[in-house]
Amino acid sequence: MENIDLDASTEAVTETLNTLASMSGHEKWDYISNALAGFLPKLLAAAILLLVGLILVRLLIKFLSRLLGKSKLDPVLSGFLTSILRAVLYIVLGVVALSVLVPDAVGMLVALLSVFGLAISLAVKDSLANLAGGFSVLLTGPFTLNDFVSINGTEGVIQEIRLNYTVLKTYDNTIIHIPNGDVAKAQIVNYTCQHTRRLDLTVSIGYGDDFEQAEKILAEIVAAHPAALAEPAPFIRMIEHGDSAIHIACRVWCDFDNFFSLKCDLLEEIKRRFDAAGISIPYQQLDVHINPVPAAHK
């Protein structure tokens, strides 16, 4: 590639400005008109090239997206590769269009990058870290498309992995973009990588209530619910003597899709059955005892 002499280019621009300064108004107009007459065809050619190139890039990306969609590649990986290819094609198209206007555009870009390389590297270090994080997530595969995950406490369904961000959709239909660099370092909990999930409930009853009766009622409620799995067997036992209540663990396995509905159904039915059986569900309370002050101290 031809080396670009920035000093020579600067001298040429300075000489042109000096020439314009020494011209009269009419001569300046003629000079600028001739320059524009030679530049406009290049500008038109670059615009046409850019327009046609944008159309071709979009058609190519659309074709490749369909092709990758029919392949056996993971949908997340397919979307990530498509994003990279789109960015590369747009950069190439921009350089080609610029080279039509300025024949030495490629060489000038290389020279400028060499001069401002450090500044550019500092400016894009976060983007490069996010790009590397995206590759790391794809290689390790902690989740795939449509998985329900928690990333550092942020829960949602995986929608897409882009060049710099992982896109989550929460259950309240909020879209969250998490930088891939953070995702690669985050604690990730994947709730859908297994088909079944255990529901853990802690049911509290008063110390004056019959805990064996409460455990029996809980077992009946669980056995009657169609979403509760018989295997692995449910676990229903007293686990703690609390400050103001006895705590009974109720651990039930279910299919992932039934987790939240089973939780709500059990809580509602437990309340109904305990009320009918006269079993209390105590709330946190504090008893304060005030001793009367002896008369001698009044």
Image (cartoon, rainbow, N blue to C red):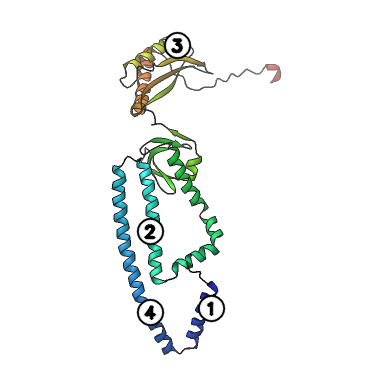
Instruction: Relative to 119, say whether 183 is above or below.
Output: above
- Lower position in the chain sequence, tag 3 or tag 4: 4
Q: Which quadrant holds residue 149? A: top left
Q: Which residue is mark 2?
A: 90
Q: Which quadrant holds residue 201? A: top left
Question: Could you tell me how far apart the alpha carbons at marks 3 and 4 are, in whole angstroms?
Answer: 93 Å
The type of residue carrying mark 3 is Phe
Question: Could you tell me how far apart the alpha carbons at marks 1 and 4 are, in whole angstroms?
Answer: 21 Å
Q: Which residue is mark 1?
A: 11
Residue displayed at 53% across by 78% down:
11
- Lower position in the chain sequence, tag 2 or tag 1: 1
Residue displayed at 30% across by 44% down:
69
Residue displayed at 28% across by 51% down:
63
Q: Quadrant of the C terminus?
A: top right
Question: Could you tell me how far apart the alpha carbons at marks 2 and 1 are, in whole angstroms?
Answer: 33 Å
Q: Are marks 4 and 2 in contact (CB under 8 Å)?
A: no
Q: Which residue is mark 3?
A: 211
Question: Could you tell me how far apart the alpha carbons at marks 3 and 2 are, in whole angstroms?
Answer: 69 Å
Question: Could you tell me how far apart the alpha carbons at marks 1 and 3 are, in whole angstroms?
Answer: 94 Å
Q: Which residue is mark 4?
A: 36
Q: Is residue 49 left or right of residue 140?
A: left
Answer few, some or many: residues within 10 Å of disc 3's Cα (few below 14, many 20 plus, some between 14 and 19): some
Residue 55 can be seen in this image: yes
State which mark lies toward you, 3 or 2: 2
